[in-house]
Amino acid sequence: IAATPCAAEDDNCWIWTENQCQGDDITTNASYEANRWFTPARGSDGWQESFQDYDRLVGYAHLTYSSDLASVTVDVIATHRDDAVLAYHFNGSAAGAGPLGRNSSSSATFTKAKDSGPLYITVTAADGAELELEPVDFHWDAPEVSPEAGNTVYKGGQKGAIVEFFGWPHQDIEEECAFLSQAGYMGAKFFPVQEQVMSTQPFQNDLNPWYFMYQPMSYRLGGRMGSREDLRNAVHTCRSLGVRAYADAVINHMVGGGNDANPDHRDTGCTYWGNKDSSLSGGQSPSYTQCYSYTVGNYTQLPPSQEFPAVPYGPSDFHCERVLNSWTDPLDLNAGWLDGLVDLNTEKDYVQGRIAAYLTDLVSIGFSGVRVDAAKHIAPDDIIGIFTKFRDNMGGSLPDDFVAWLEVLLGGESDLLMCDPDSGYNYGSYLADGLKAAGFSDEDVEKIKIWNSGYPKEPQNGYCTITASRNAIQNDDADQQTEGSTSRDMGDQGCVLVEDCEPDEHRQFEVKLFEDPNGMSDNDVDYPIRLILSSYYWQGNSKGVPDGLSDCSLCEGDECGGCQTTVQWDAFDADSCGYDDEYTRPHRDITIVNAMRGWMGLTNLSYADVGLRTC
């Protein structure tokens, strides 16, 4: 591969300019697989314990459940750079060894009657390399949702109100689930739970801004808001109280170009920076991108490319680099690098399968569904492929209470995205028909919903060729929290609480969401998933999160002078009556609670009924 540096303002500050898309090409040439294995070897400069032996050994666990979800086959998919003999260990027991070569696998089957998780898997190679995989949870270990939440008004998890907890640590959500249960909410939505970018240096003057949560470094469940154990505890506690849990699935892309583990970055203006860290306790997973790089790998002697060994993804699992210039061109929408985020090649069978395995892991730990972030940047046919593989992992049908909602921001492209089934890029009837053609039952198609970004101003644009029963709706949402956001236009039909909206006005829109939402013809059937955001107020100009990890006292290095701090606030407050001054908590407002309960056919409550005697 010819590695060509670009010209620069200073001849000493060239950077590699590899893998740029040409014309309508969107794939990364297979020759870039030679750039793989950039991770430093154990004991060499730049290596850290959390890098394991990713310089030559990668793998993941793939789960396939029986149709009754009472057994699961765990296939370990492992790749060794040099085709070494591999051995597999399930909870310390060797499962077999042999000259299995690249992409080899070893399997074991576990049953609900005899086995409980988490399952720990290690792969060892004859050359001494060792790989410890992410723990495996079994679906049956998650508590059954209590009889209260099984009440027929929730239609088995297909109708109800879900509270989105923006910036809430897992442990705080766990504590809040007692209130959600008493109030009658169906579920709690967690923001991204996978390993994500973190840093000890400011980015655009903010230390760990909120949007770093949407830059995955791996699919390991160790996000900013808590560890895998914290997550498991929270999800299981909520389920035992009758509250379902939902995850924010970031599956279109990985990190932003240059936001990776490579210690050597610079731009053509001779600004240098090092590696990013991650949210994972015990050390980050290695991650590499082609952007802002000027060094070569010790093993490859080639520049870095897109490589995420803990997934694992390699260079050909991504689209070539393409600026997203058009919001009306399906090719750009699907393959463009949104805001510089390295874009997954979701047309590829392996990528679809790996994403499906990640969704299976989320459901196995106890989630009842997912929000799919940036879904309009994943082609409809690729969405069908991903959910087909996920369905097959779950025994041939979607779990009974499963629900997904796809974030399809319409902008001015509602005809392309929803209303014209022949547009070539349609999430309306084209997607529904494609799911049916892939063998999805009508019942399972209903479980894959579109988040209607046209609501409340132009709700008809969010269903067009499908029924409103396949819509999820919301007033205030996380993408609108920042000043100047153009993600949605609510006009005078809704407002964002933290952006100069008074609580009384905001309350009216949230009540309307449940009692008389725009575009509704049957309030019992239409918009069966309705979401309410629990957020927080910004501190000055900072776009950090008040979990303590955006506090500039944690800043290191020479760039801390302009750091805009966000100090720690408590997300959980057992005495909150809603509409607070730090974390907002509108879901606790009794007027909103009773509007929601009325929609669900439940009786009104007082503050005292939900344990709040001082409101």
Image (cartoon, rainbow, N blue to C red):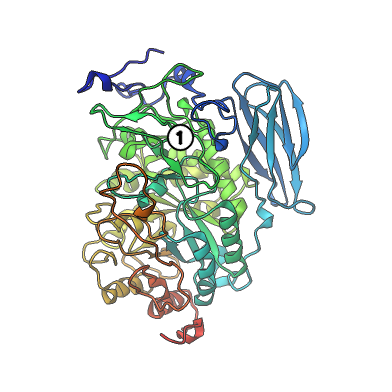
Please give the residue where the numbered disc 1 appears in the rendered image: 346
Q: Is residue 100 above or below residue 589?
A: above
Q: Position of residue 458 (x, y in %)?
A: 27, 59
Going by the image, does 327 lie left or right of 192?
left
Q: Position of residue 312 (x, y in %)?
A: 54, 33
Q: Is residue 98 above or below residue 555?
A: above
- Residue 264 found in image quarter: top left
> Residue at the spot x=37%, y=67% of the render?
583
- Residue 379 found in image quarter: top left
> Residue at the spot x=33%, y=45% of the render?
417
| Quadrant where the C terminus is found in the figure | bottom left
Which of the pair 152/70 is nearer the observer?
A: 70
| Quadrant where the N terminus is found in the figure | top left
- The kind of residue tagged 1 is Thr
Which of the pair 409/341 is nearer the observer?
A: 341
Q: Is residue 526 above or below residue 123?
A: below
Q: Is residue 602 visible in this depiction of the protein?
A: yes
- The secondary structure type at the circle numbered 1 is loop
Q: Position of residue 448 (x, y in %)?
A: 48, 52
> Residue at the spot x=59%, y=21% of the render?
81
Q: Is residue 424 visible in this depiction of the protein?
A: no
Which of the pair 364/423 is nearer the observer?
A: 364
